[in-house]
Each structure stands twice: as C-alpha cells, then as structure tokens.
Image (cartoon, grey):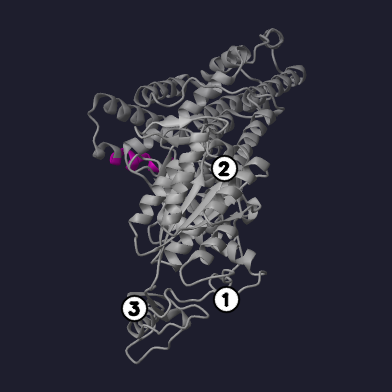
Amino acid sequence: MVRSFHRVPAHTARYGRYSGGDPLAPPVPVQQALEAIGADVMAGVSAERAMREYLRRGGSGRQGLDDLARRVRERRAELVSRHRLDGTLQEVRQLLDRAVLEERKRLATDVQLDDDARAFAEMRLENLPPSTAAAVNDLADYDWQSPAARADYDKIRELLGRELLDQRFAGMKQALENATDADRQAIREMLDDLNALLDKRRLGEDTQADFDEFMRKHGAQFPENPQNLDELMDALAQRSAAAQRMLNSMSPEQRDELMNLAAQAFGSPELMQSLSLLDDNLRALRPGEDWTGSASFSGDEPMGLGEATGVMQDLSDLDALAEQLGQVYPGARMDDIDLDALARLVGDDAAVNARALRDLEQQLRDTGMLQRASDGSLRLTPKAMRQLGRALMWDVATRQSARSGRRETRNAGAAGDRTGATREWAYGDTEPWDIPRTVSNAVLRTIASGGDASHGVRLDTRDVEVVETEQRTTAAVALLVDTSFSMAMDDRWVPMKRTALALHHLISTRFRGDDLQLIAFSRYAEVVDIEQLTAKDAVWDKGTNLHHALLLAERHFRRHPTAQPVLLIVTDGEPTAHLEPNGEVFFSYPPDPYTVAVTVRELDTVQRMGAQTTFFRLGDDPSLAQFIDALAARADGRVVAPELADLGRAVVDSYLGARPGRSGTPEDLGGMLRGRSWWW
C-alpha cells in the first residue's frame, strides 16, 4: 500500500545530528584575516580582492573556497565515474529472462497441455525479438502457463510504473512497493488533479483555495509540504528537469528501449500519458530549469530511473555549488552558498568550513573593518587602519625592547594643561584618574554582566580612565615617502607603507598634539591620507620629485608656526625631477644640475625654518649614498640606512628623538605598547 507522509505537528520537538562543527573550536579569526588582508592591501591589492583572496585561501586550519570547490569537483567526478544509467533496463531484462525460463520449464513438464498449444507457445518464446522493450510488448497478450513466470512478468510492469513515478516524485518507488489497485488508482487521480491544477495556472485561473483542496486530497504524497502552488511547481520542475537530463544522458538505443517499455507501466499507457502531460505543463511553467543538459557516465554501478534522476539532481546541485564557491559572478555573496547541499553532498566538515568563512566575511563588515566607499569599492575602514597601525607599533616596540635608552614617558603632554580627553589606564601611567568616567565604566560593566549596581560596585582595572594633558610644545611632522616605481621594483613598497602606518598610529594615538602630513612623491608630489597611501598601487612613473615634496612640506610647516618642524624623508634615488614655475614637471636622468639646485634651495628653506631633518636611504648605491650624505650635512641633519625590516623602527626612533623636549636616544616603547608582533 501507499506509504503516507504525515506532517509533523508544530509543537513536536525534532532532533537530529549536530552539524555545526566543533563547539570548542577557536572563534572566527578576524584578527588573522585582517592581518592577511592588510598585507595584500599594502602590496597594492584592492581591499575587495584581498578579502576574496583570503576567503579563497582560507586560514587558521580551515579550508578556503578553492579547497571546497576542489572537493565539489572531486565529488562530481566520483558520481559520473561510478554509475551507469541502464539499471532499470538491466533489471527488466533479468525479470524477462527469468519469466521466459520458468515458462519454458512449465511447457516442457506440463503433460496436460495440448501439444498444439505447447508448440505454439514454444514458437512464440523462441521467436521473441532481441530488444527487451519489443519482447515485453510482444508478450503483453501472452497466456502464461507458469504462475511464477506470470508473476515475474507482472513485476516488470510494476517496476516500470514505480520507476517512472520515482523519476518525478522522489521516494515513490519504495512507497508503491506491494501497492494495490486502489493505490495505483489514487496515483492516477493525483496526476489528473495535478495536471488540472497546472492547466489552471497556465490560464491564470488558479487560486490558493484550489491548491489547498489539492493538498487536502493528496498532501500525504508530498513530504516537502509545499505551502502554495509555486513551491510545489518548483520542487516538481526540478525533479522533472533532472529526469529529462537523465534521458538526454542515455544512448539513443537505451532511450528508445525505455520509451517503448514505458507503455507497459502498470499494464497500460495511461500512466505515461499523464506523466508526459505533467512534463509538458512543468516545462511551460518553469522554462528556466535546465531541460537540455546531460552528463557522461562511465561507471559500472547500474542505477534505476529514480536513483539516476536523484543523481542528476545531485550533479546539478554540485554544479551550482561550484559556481557559488567560485564567487565570480556579479553580486556574488558568501550567503549564496547552500550549506545544506554542501553538507549533504560533500560532508559536514565542508559545510562547517564554508560557514566559518561566511561568518568571517560578515564579522569583518559588522565590526567595522571593511565598508563600501561611495564608488562601490570595498575599503579598509579607519578602525581597521588603527588596528593595523597598533600591530605595527607592537612590532616596533618589540624591535626596540633590546635597545638601551630611557623608558618612554606615558604622559601625552609633559606637565601640561588638561585637554579634556581621557584614555584607558595602562601599566605605568601616572596621570590622575578621571573619577566620574571610572565609576561610570564600573556601573555599566556591572549592569552589562547582570549585576546590581544600586548597592555599589567593585572597581576593576578595566574601568579606570586617566586624564590626558596638553603638550606644551608640539611637532609638525612631514613624512616624505618615495613612491617611484623603483620602490616597488626593489621590494621596498610594502615596508614603506607599513612604516607610514606605524608612525601615523603612534602620532594619532599617543602624541595627538603633533600634526603629521604624509607626502608621496614620484613624478609629482601629493599630500595623501593614510588610507590613500596604504591602498596606493605601484605604477610605472618616471621621476623622483623631491623638490615638489619639499615645497609641500614647507607649506605644512608654515601652517604650524609654533610647532617644531620634523622632516623625515624615505627615498631610494636621487632627485630626477622638479616643478617648473608653470606647474609642469621637468624630468631628466641622470639628474640635471638645475633639478639638484632647486631641490637643495628648498631644503635650505626648510632648514631655515628650524626643521630637524632625517634621510632614510634605501639601497646601497654609492652615488646615492654620497648625494644623500651631502644633503644631510647641508641641512644639519642625519642619514639612516636601515635594513628594510628595520625601517619602521628607524623612522619612529627619529621622530621620537626629534620631538621638542627630547634629546639623545629615543625612549623605549616597550612600556607604551605591550604585546608581541603579529604582522610585519
């Protein structure tokens, strides 16, 4: 009899195998992801592409999208290399051969059978056509003498009917096992009612009441429990399209055999006619399904029609997963990945990895690390830049920890007036507490943890905030960084950016009274903010226009007449360009004497403003070293030739040593920034 599928009551609890991965696994590695993305951005990759590349690679012991896509491809290859599509035809042939063999035995041993009837029956069996379908059809009106042979022949009709239904309605083959005539009649009525309902939809005359009435009568045969006709059509069309793709994948001979056999399903052509009408309706109502695809199977494991249709659906789902994991189509999102299909077809661990990547992308956005710019591009936010800058300063502090020198003072200003700002207390701070903010933090923390603050609170070091004081003397800092192509060509591009980010973070968080201006110079010079500099890509740009950069630095210093000018220049080449009075750039290599002259003139102007100047020479070119040494001597400055890995430490050292009120060796940053480096 037909096995009914009952809806689960709303109040019934349902339990299943946990598929969320290791609940004790470490949290989504946002910090690690930001590290990797920031490194790529520093190298000139867009934030969008950097995030996509990280998701493709994966991290923290988790597989990335590329690994998951590879597993999807392997699973697809496994399915087509294991199976073949002639399982039903093979099973029909076996039943037919067994029926014929049993009939011949009966004809040979039945002594009561008329000799003429025996001879005629043996002749019919002897002259059966070689085609399985033709032989089955030829025996449709045969008067079987053997009950066992008749039973096997009836099994062929029963099998064909159940397989054809299983193609369109998953699970029907098992549900109709040992079905009665009443069960088969119920199926025919369901198909008639379904086709009538779909006809109404094609004419635009269907209503929700029509669907509800259909489900009232036949809902037990649809375990998907669709809520409206569209949901029902979606499920049926996907299955029907998979059945058509399965037929397309058969050889012409197999397809012809199957079509000829279909007329014998349940002993009449009515079932096949109803199913053909259903396919036509679904094809018209869901033309977007893949009705023309196919697959090439090469395995040894035979499949029945229903099973083969299920495999075709799996192949379609695997193709969709490959596209979703590729994330190359317009508007691609990690939310597009069907985690349920991934778990079912590839494995629970694959779904766990994909879910972690999806959550990572979402957390990068939700925590304010990435945001869309006005042009639609994805960029690192100021919060992300501060996080990266702090990490870089940790590295600088680590590199300085072994060096001798005084400990850096924790004061934002030396015995100055209060600025009105506060900050979190850290070990070594001597500033007075801000009592209202400290108590307020304790109250908020107590309430957030579910406690009652009405009877007092217990202070924690996390609650304490100290008062910042104003620096009596400040610095106007101009960091001039060479962005000519040679910097990128000689692998100095990323260390230069990291240095700028570390200095920017130090000044913006620890010496807020100082004013830093970043000036990038190649053929032209330009004032850039830290986000522009870190995202700047290397381009082929001839020229090292230090003259123009010095002009911009001079303007910066004039805007801060009471501040101490600090000039920091990072370069790997002699000046080969200068700015003409009309705004045009003059370029010459080797350097033109006039270019050198106007550059030196601007350096003299900056020097007369009292700037403390440091050149950071990158590279070992003797002529460059000689030229930079001469410039430094003229500006009463100094030259540092650091290794690339020490560039950041050298620049921070120079800045701290040049600040007003400080002399000699810069103080150790170890007390200022605690922790160990995670990125340099």
Q: Is residue 620 magenta?
A: no
Of the residues shown, which amino acid type is indicated by label 1? Arg
Counting residues from the N terminus, which is met first, the one under dot 3 or under dot 2? 2
Look at discs 3 and 2 and give the one toward the viewer.
3
Q: Quadrant of residue 194?
A: top left
Which mark, residue 407? 1
Query: Which secondary structure is most common in the magenta stretch?
Result: helix
Q: Is residue 170 above or below residue 262?
A: below
Contact? badges 3 and 1 (CB < 8 Å): no
Q: Alpha-carbon neighbours of circle 1 within 10 Å: few (<14), some, or many (≥20)? A: few
Q: Alpha-carbon neighbours of circle 2 within 10 Å: few (<14), some, or many (≥20)? A: many
Q: Is residue 90 above or below residue 332?
A: above
Q: In the depicted view, which residue is nearer to us: 22 or 454?
A: 454
Where is mark 2, residue-wise? 56
Counting residues from the N terminus, which is met first, the one under dot 2 or under dot 1? 2
Q: Which residues are magenta?
A: 212-221
Q: Quadrant of residue 397?
A: bottom right
Where is mark 3, residue-wise? 418
Of the residues shown, which amino acid type is indicated by label 2? Arg
Q: Is residue 640 left or right of residue 34?
A: right
Q: In the depicted view, which residue is nearer to us: 400 or 525?
A: 525
Residue drawn 29% across and 41% down? 212
Q: Residue 460: percent from the left, percent from the top?
A: 46, 84
Q: Is residue 656 left or right of residue 381?
A: right
Residue drawn 55% across and 59% down? 392
Q: Is residue 18 above or below residue 209?
A: below
Q: Quadrant of the C terminus?
A: bottom right
Q: Residue 111: percent from the left, percent from the top?
A: 75, 18
Distance between the alpha carbons at the discs numbered 2 and 1: 44 Å
